[in-house]
Image (cartoon, rainbow, N blue to C red):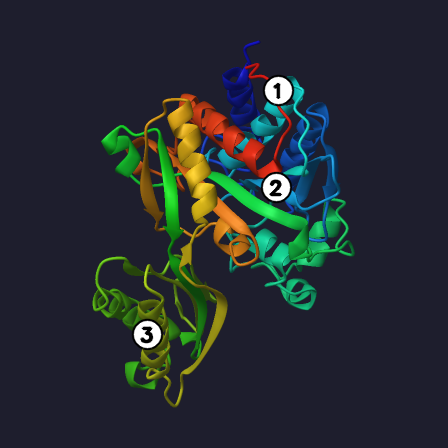
Amino acid sequence: MLSNVLARIDQHIKTLGQYTSTPGNGTTRMTYSKEDLQARNYLKEVMKDYGLTVSEDGVGNIFGKLAGEVNGPSVLIGSHFDSVPHGGNYDGPAGVIAGLEVAKLFQENGIQPKYPLEVVALVEEEGSRFGGGLMGSRSITGKLTDQTFRELTDSQGVSTVEAMKSIGLNPELIKKRDKETMKAYLELHIEQGPILEKEKISIGIVEGIVGLSQLEVTIQGRAGHAGTTPMNDRADALVVAAQIIAKLPTIAEIYGEGTVATVGKLSVYPNGANVIPGSVTFTIDLRSTDEANLKSLLNDTQTFIRQWKKEKISISIAEQLYMSPTILDDEVKQQLKKGCQKHEISYQSIFSGAGHDAMVFAEQTKAAMIFIPSKDGLSHCPEEWSDHHDIEKAVYVLFEAVKHLTEANQHEQLY
């Protein structure tokens, strides 16, 4: 019996790609938006069709569960389904789809797992609406408390609770999950870099994930008329912000390869062509493969920024996220390699320079990731694309690992 995995992957990618607020200009699917609701309804219907029991938690994460012979801890597999503004169709959804197709192979082949299998579709990994990122996995593991979650607002002042209720979700449901209910977490993701494509390798076995910190900096000056305020009497928040931002790459470069700093979001108030900016808020994303370097860079960055505080300029710094560099589970990595060998799929070890939900789960359970190639190394843009044949290969690799982790009872190979 041959499985039609590839055709289903094509259909899932096509359908989810329609749920964007910027048609023709990439995928923009903000958490708790109309597009979020469309995508989650589709994913829930697929889960039901694949024989999974569907539930959601208090932040809107979606779970599709295949019960095991025993009521023990689950093997979780999936990724996130939100996007950056004007992103692509693969960052996140490819991993959710892979999880769905692993569950479908269990259904098609009549395989009964000893331990439960859960396909997970996680919210707000990107942090595009509420900042910080990795919100779904941080909530499950308790790193994001219910109180902190309720205090989060988007750029328009809309709270998480208000946004959830606007699409019919229930923020009163349980958020944190007992780590004893999780046996392992597996995630497929597009590489978002050029290595696998350049080497013509189908699968990257992720050895570890970079550590990262995200800061939100607010420079408070004084607004004024652009024509009538003398230069020596100005408190221009944007000028100060620009001077800080220009220096950040130099600070990061001191720590060498694998350590980077990025300012990716900046808001100016009141943002008028003839008004001196009164306040500026911007984000700083710091990353390093070495935790000592990351902590030093974080300290140096904050010390440098605070030096710009002066009589007419005040500065505040909020740390939205801190995640240590993560080494993923050796046992699960070995199972993934065995799957590649069994199906004669090319693979190599690789390190992730991007943060992923797997790094959050790794603090509480066995966690592993595989990458598939990204065309031209592009991601977070409309041009983002990965070959669906590579997603299919990844499904079979993950299927082998999940069978082992759930100790599935399989008498013969049917697909």
| 117 and 266: which is toward the camera | 117
Q: Quadrant of the N terminus?
A: top right
Q: Nearer the viewer, mark 1 or mark 2?
A: 1
Whichever of callouts 3 and 2 sits on the residue coming sooner in the sequence is 2
**Residue 53, image quadrant:** top right
Helix, strand, or loop for circle 3? helix
Q: Quadrant of residue 222?
A: bottom left
Drawn side of residue 65 relative to residue 374, left or right: right
Secondary structure state at the residue bearing disc 1: loop
User: How far apart are labels 1 and 3 at the CA level?
Assistant: 54 Å
Residue denoted by label 3: 296
- Whole-percent x and y of residue 231? 29, 81
Give the number of the mark in front: 3 or 2. Answer: 2
Q: Which residue is mark 1?
A: 411
User: Image point 57% across, 50% down: which residue?
Assistant: 124
Secondary structure category for the residue under label 2 = strand
Residue lying at the far bottom of the rendered structure: 311
Residue at the image point whose x is 71% and y is 35% from the top: 68
Residue 394 picture quarter: top left
- Indicate whether 347 appears above or below 180: above
